[in-house]
Image (cartoon, helix red, strand yellow):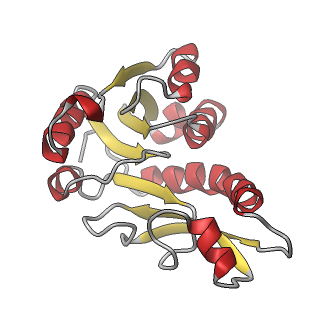
Amino acid sequence: MRNIVILISGGGSNMTALVRAAQAGRWAERLDARVAAVLSNRADAAGLRWAREQGLATAVVAHTDHASREAFDAALMQAIDAHQPALVLLAGFMRILTPGFVEHYAGRLLNIHPSLLPAFPGLHTHRRAIEAGCRVAGATVHVVTPELDHGPILAQAAVPVLAGDTPEVLAARVLSQEHRIYPQAVADWLRTRPTAAPI
């Protein structure tokens, strides 16, 4: 059975979509995979409670407890590797990861980003899309590489930018598509890698 570890920093709505897809889509039987654990860098991340209610293992590795990004990433890797993951999913995990962390999970670290990459990497994507006069916005699932939000694209979904949109309204429209494409991209990734062992 291939273990999936999900990293969150807040409410975990994408994590919830992934877990529900795993439950409803019978990933264990069809894809030999399961969500094994949900980890966060914040003890107050609301998604942790929901994950525990689903019977998932949870843990907190607080970035504030470490003097450097490298020290935090080393502790986070130790917590993740305890679950022998075949796949690590960033789902609203609001930390920039070091190249060493990314290299450790090379090819098995995925992220969901709220823009149509390569447009608008980084933060404040919805405000930037509106200010740029974009007529469409969207979300991208991609493989994580050392360069922020520049890894190979696995899936995208577009939504219209409407007259009068605020960043918050546009974000909600994009988020509904994130919840759709992230579980599908993960299932596709698993389907093309039929091995039970961590990569």
| Residue 144 position (above or below residue 79) | below
Q: Position of residue 163 (x, y in %)?
A: 86, 76
Q: Quadrant of residue 124?
A: bottom right
Work out whether residue 156 can be spotted.
Answer: no
Q: Residue at x 56, y 36 (%)?
A: 12
Q: Quadrant of the N terminus?
A: top left
Q: Residue at x 65, y 49 (%)?
A: 179
Work out whether residue 80 can be spotted.
Answer: yes
162 or 54, which is in the foreground? 162
Q: Quadrant of residue 177?
A: bottom right
In this picture, residue 68 sits left or right of residue 161: left
Residue furthest to the right in view is 163
| Residue 72 position (above or below residue 189) | above
Q: Position of residue 166 (x, y in %)?
A: 76, 64
* Circle count: 0
Q: Residue at x 74, y 82 (%)?
A: 135
In this picture, residue 122 sits left or right of residue 64: right
Q: Residue at x 32, y 45 (%)?
A: 195
137 or 38, which is in the foreground? 137
49 or 37, which is in the foreground? 49
Q: Position of residue 104 (x, y in %)?
A: 17, 50
Q: Position of residue 118 (x, y in %)?
A: 47, 79
